[in-house]
C-alpha cells in the first residue's frame, strides 16, 4: 500500500463513520421508539380497562346488596318494638326513603370523592371504620403472603427439578390436599387441636383476637405474635400449596427446552442451570399469581378472620353483612375489588418488561 493511497482510505473511513452513521443510528432508534410507543399504548389500554372495571364494581356494589331480603332499619332496632313513625324517621335519616335512582346517583357522586357515608351499625363514617381495621388485615395477610410465596416458590422449584422422586410425589400430594381444604375448616381444626386442646395435646394458642389487652412494650409484640400463629398457619397452608403447584407446573414445562440442554453442554453446574436459566423463565406464571394474591392482601380473608375473630376488614365485612349495614358493606366490597383490580393491572403493566412478547 502506497502513501498516496492512505488519504483515500482515511476519506472512505470518515465517510463510513460520519455519513451513514446518522441514518444508521436513526434506524436503531426507530424500533426502540416504536416499542416504547406500543408499550405506552398497551399500558393506557390496561389502565382504561381497569377504570371501566372499577366503575362496574361501584355500580354492582350498590345494587347487589340491596337484593338482600332483610330490612337494615329494622335490624338496627335490635328487635325492639318501634313505631312506624320512628322507622320512617330512621329511613329518612339514612336516605333510604329516596327513590332508588336518587340513592344511586348520590352514592356514586359521594364515592368518587371518597365519602362512603355513615355506618348504620356503628354510627361512624365508613372510611374511619375501614381505616381502623386495615392495619390488622395487612398484618395478618401481609405476613402470610410473604411466607407462603417464598415457601411455594422454593418447594415448587425443588419438586419440579426432582420430578418423579419420593419428595416430589409427597410434596405434590400434600399440596393438592391442602389446596382442596377449605381455609375456614382448617382454621377450626387448628383451634380445636391447638387452642382448646385434644387428648394429650394442651391448648397452646389463643382461640382468636389480635391481643390479650393487658400487655405493653415488647410483651405486647410477643402477645400479638402469639395470636398470629394459628391464622397465619391457616393462610400459609392454603396459599403455599397453590404457589407450589403453579411453580412446579411452569418449571416442568421449561425443563425440556433446548436452551437448558445447551447450558448443560457448556459444562454449567446443574444448580446454575436451574437458578440462572430455568427458574427465571418459569417465574412468569408465578409472577402473575403473586400479583393476584397481592390484591387479596388488602381484601383480606373473610372466613379466616371471622373464624379467628380477627379485627380486620374481613371480620368487619362479616359484621356489616349480618345487619346489613349497606354503606359499610358497599364500601368494603368496593375496596376489596379495587385492590384485586389494581394488583392485576400492575401485573399486566409489568409483564411486558419480563416477557417482551406481551403487548406487541
Image: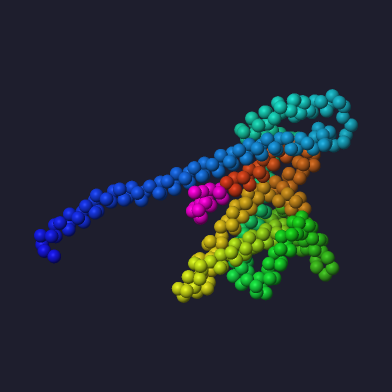
Residue at the extreme right: 81
Q: Position of residue 12 (x, y in %)?
A: 19, 55
Position in image of residue 45 (x %, y %) = 54, 42
Task: Inspect the magenta stretch and tell me whether residue 347 lies in it.
Answer: yes
Q: Tell whether 239 sits left or right of 321.
A: left
- Residue 324 visible? The answer is yes
Q: How is the image coloured?
A: rainbow
- The stretch in magenta equals 346-360
Residue 156 vs 352, above or below: the answer is below
Is residue 317 placed above or below 211 in the rendered structure? above
Residue 7: quarter of image: bottom left
Which residue lies at the image location 56% right of the left edge and 50% below the top edge? Answer: 347
Q: Position of residue 316 (x, y in %)?
A: 73, 44
Q: Quadrant of residue 5?
A: bottom left
Q: Main secondary structure of the magenta part?
A: helix
Q: Percent position (x, y) of residue 224?
A: 69, 56
Is residue 312 within the magenta segment?
A: no
Can residue 310 be seen from the camera position used here?
A: no
> For the N terminus, which image quadrant?
bottom left
Task: Please give left or right for residue 168 compared with residue 48 in the image.
Answer: right
Q: Residue at 70% across / 64% down in the picture?
A: 175
In this view of the protein, which residue sits in the foreground, 287 or 113?
287
Identify the residue shown where x is 53% and y is 48%.
349
Number of on-image labels = 0
Quarter location, residue 55: top right
Amino acid at each position: 500500500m502506497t502513501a498516496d493511497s492512505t488519504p483515500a482510505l482515511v476519506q472512505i473511513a470518515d465517510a463510513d463513520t460520519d455519513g451513514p452513521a446518522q441514518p444508521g443510528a436513526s434506524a436503531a432508534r426507530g424500533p426502540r421508539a416504536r416499542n416504547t410507543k406500543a408499550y405506552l399504548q398497551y399500558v393506557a389500554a390496561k389502565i382504561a380497562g381497569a377504570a371501566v372495571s372499577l366503575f362496574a364494581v361501584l355500580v354492582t356494589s350498590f345494587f347487589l346488596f340491596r337484593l338482600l331480603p332483610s330490612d337494615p332499619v329494622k335490624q338496627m332496632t335490635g328487635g325492639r318494638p318501634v313505631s312506624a313513625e320512628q322507622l320512617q324517621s330512621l329511613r329518612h335519616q339514612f336516605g333510604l326513603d329516596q327513590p332508588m335512582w336518587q340513592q344511586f346517583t348520590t352514592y356514586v357522586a359521594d364515592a368518587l370523592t371518597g365519602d362512603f357515608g355513615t355506618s348504620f351499625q356503628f354510627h361512624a363514617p365508613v372510611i374511619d371504620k375501614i381505616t381502623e381495621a386495615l392495619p390488622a388485615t395487612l398484618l395478618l395477610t401481609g405476613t402470610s403472603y410473604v411466607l407462603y410465596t417464598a415457601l411455594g416458590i422454593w418447594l415448587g422449584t425443588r419438586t419440579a427439578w426432582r420430578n418423579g422422586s419420593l419428595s416430589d410425589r409427597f410434596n405434590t400430594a400434600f399440596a393438592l390436599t391442602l389446596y382442596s381444604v377449605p381455609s375456614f375448616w382448617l382454621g377450626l381444626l387448628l383451634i380445636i387441636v391447638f387452642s382448646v386442646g385434644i387428648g394429650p395435646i394442651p391448648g397452646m394458642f389463643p382461640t382468636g383476637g389480635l391481643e390479650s389487652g393487658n400487655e405493653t412494650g415488647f410483651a405486647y409484640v410477643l402477645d400479638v405474635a402469639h395470636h398470629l400463629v394459628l391464622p397465619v398457619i391457616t393462610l400459609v397452608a392454603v396459599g403455599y400449596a397453590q404457589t407450589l403447584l403453579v411453580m412446579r407446573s411452569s418449571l416442568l414445562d421449561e425443563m425440556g427446552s433446548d436452551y437448558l440442554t445447551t447450558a448443560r453442554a457448556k459444562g454449567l453446574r446443574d444448580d446454575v442451570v436451574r437458578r440462572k436459566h430455568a427458574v427465571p423463565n418459569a417465574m412468569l406464571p408465578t409472577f402473575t399469581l403473586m400479583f393476584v394474591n397481592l390484591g387479596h392482601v388488602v381484601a383480606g380473608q373473610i372466613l379466616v378472620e371471622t373464624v379467628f375473630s380477627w379485627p380486620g376488614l374481613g371480620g368487619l365485612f362479616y359484621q356489616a353483612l349480618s345487619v346489613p349495614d349497606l354503606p359499610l358493606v358497599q364500601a368494603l366490597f368496593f375496596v376489596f375489588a379495587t385492590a384485586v383490580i389494581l394488583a392485576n393491572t400492575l401485573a399486566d403493566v409489568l409483564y411486558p418488561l419480563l416477557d417482551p412478547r406481551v403487548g406487541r
